[in-house]
Amino acid sequence: MAGDWIWRPIPLLVNFLAAAFVLRLISFVYSVYNYDESLYILMGSELGKGHLPYTTICDLKPFGLFGLFSLFTALPFDGIIVSRIAACLAVGATAYLLSGVAGLLFDDESRSIGVTSGLTYIVFTLATGGVAAQGELFLNLFAVLALFLLLRALRDPVGFRASTLIGIGLCVGIGIQIKQSILFDILALFACFFILTTPRAADLPTRVRASALGLVVVGIVAILPTLAVMLTYGLAGEWDAWVAGNITAHRVFYGLERRFEFEPAFRAMWEQAPLWIAAALALAFSRRLACGNHEVRACVFLGLWFGSIIVCQVFLRIASDHYFLQFLPSASLMAGFVLARGVLDHVQRQRVRYALLSVLVGTMLFAIAKEPLLHTIYVLKDRLITAERWAGDTPRQVAADLASVLQPGDTIYVVGFQPIIYYMTQTRPATRFAFTGLPHRDYPGRDGCPWVEPRVEMQRILAARPKMIVVEDGIFFRELAPEVKSLLMHSLATDYRLRKRYEQHYMHHLYPFERFVMNGGAPVEVYELVAGDPAKLAEPNMRNAP
């Protein structure tokens, strides 16, 4: 493979970016694949309007993630589409860096390990919630870039230059501002340095002392982005908002006091089962497959990296599917190592290698995305042939229908997991708790804002009489506390009329697009405020209760 021009650095990068776009085309079908992404887009839009995160909208992710999405929503294009394009770019760039990391960890002149690792990474981002522009996709980019800079410096005769240390520190610092869980990647990165540079355990104290200054430089640079954010909030007089979103919310939502959610963790592991098996094989047969002790140590590092993410999941407790995207860099490298050394490197003819790699990618893609692909075909048929422009995409349908009746500055209220409707209609949310429409019932303070009793917040929202109320017919509405639900139902019956109900497209039942979280196709009902007209107030409310 190495002799072919397409594996040179620039063409290789272009190939990975193209592969990411082609394989992730299904990510452009719906406005919502995961409600976390919807909130990132909404928060980014609010930041673009000059509103600091945690002040007008609540969440517990770091400032940097919202800053990233503020760039996506600031462009004169659909912020949802731009976010998905950015995710494709991040995935393709990460795959390219993984191929470079493979060449630095292993003797990979043929690039078979690197190319296989990169393609494996791209394909498996389609599982465990990675179709959406999740924070982990951007976090992985900076974690792998930091590793690439570290490994390249180890090959540099001069050693670690100041620019390299600053670059690694910035990758860590920006990564922390995307999601703090990158710290578990960084622990593995430091382990990598000592594993690869210290063959004998007896030499470890000497190596630590010799590296202390460089580690201090990396640490100082890494903390600068967070200090800059803290200073911004302090100067803006919003220090309490920063504390609520970055300390209080994490203290009450994560940690060992909470029960570990084994069932969703098992489902996510099952989605990634081939990678977990490949990781086990890489560790079990590393001595047989490796070309030297340095490659064995590289496998040990990858195993420790994978293990550090397991510890991360245990700490986070809730086992959301997209959290498992953090396994992909280390697991893809181990899968690439096993497949290349076990199969591809034994094939002499280049065309046969390409054919095997194509079959491998196609098989993985079919196994992971066969239902989403079939779903897409049927939904696009409805959109293109039957002229249902947004068939299957409830938020898009709602936004399109309300475009003619809503004005900038109007207030609407969305109950459930479709906060993207606020962004698409460019209206003011009726509550800071836009994630579901209410403060978290079970974990007070988890939302990233000072907690308010849900009943009190519902009373405040209804008293403000938002122009439209959108109710997602889903689990959140069905499990509302009775005293809260009764307030909403009474207001809908007396102050609002049912404008329209949007049913769920039949494809969501036949071929589910996402195995875990898919709210873009959920049925909703839209209620319109009756502006004091006695005749309209007397009209029966024909709501079909979920």
Image: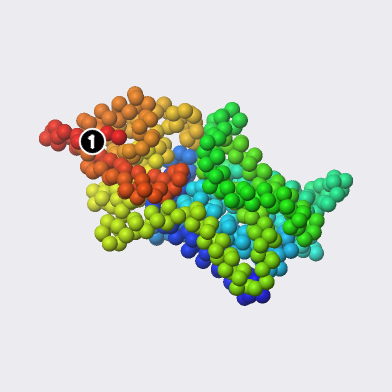
Residue 44, horizontal then vertical, whole percent = 45, 49
Residue at (34% x, 56% y) in the render: 379
Residue 150, horizontal then vertical, whole percent = 71, 56
- The reply to whether residue 253 is visible in this rendering is yes
The relative height of residue 447 versus residue 107 in the rendered view (above or below) is above
The relative height of residue 160 versus residue 276 in the rendered view (above or below) is below
- The reply to whether residue 250 is visible in this rendering is no
Residue at (42% x, 53% y) in the render: 372
Residue 1, horizontal then vertical, whole percent = 65, 71
Residue 81's quadrant in the figure? bottom left
Left or right, 235 with respect to 294, comes to left
Residue 481's quadrant in the figure? top left
Label 1 SS: loop
Q: Residue furthest left?
A: 535
Q: Which residue is mark 1?
A: 543
The relative height of residue 209 versus residue 24 in the rendered view (above or below) is above
Count the marks: how many? Answer: 1
What colouring style does the render use?
A: rainbow
Residue 541, horizontal then vertical, whole percent = 19, 34
Query: Which residue type does callout 1 highlight?
Result: Arg
Q: Residue furthest right?
A: 202
Closer to us: 218 or 121: 121
Residue at (71% x, 68% y) in the render: 109
Residue at (40% x, 56% y) in the render: 374
The relative height of residue 441 versus residue 376 in the rendered view (above or below) is above
Graded by Cα atoms within 10 Å as few (under 14), some (14 to 19) or many (20 or more), the crowding at tag 1 reads: some
Figure quadrant of the C terminus: top left
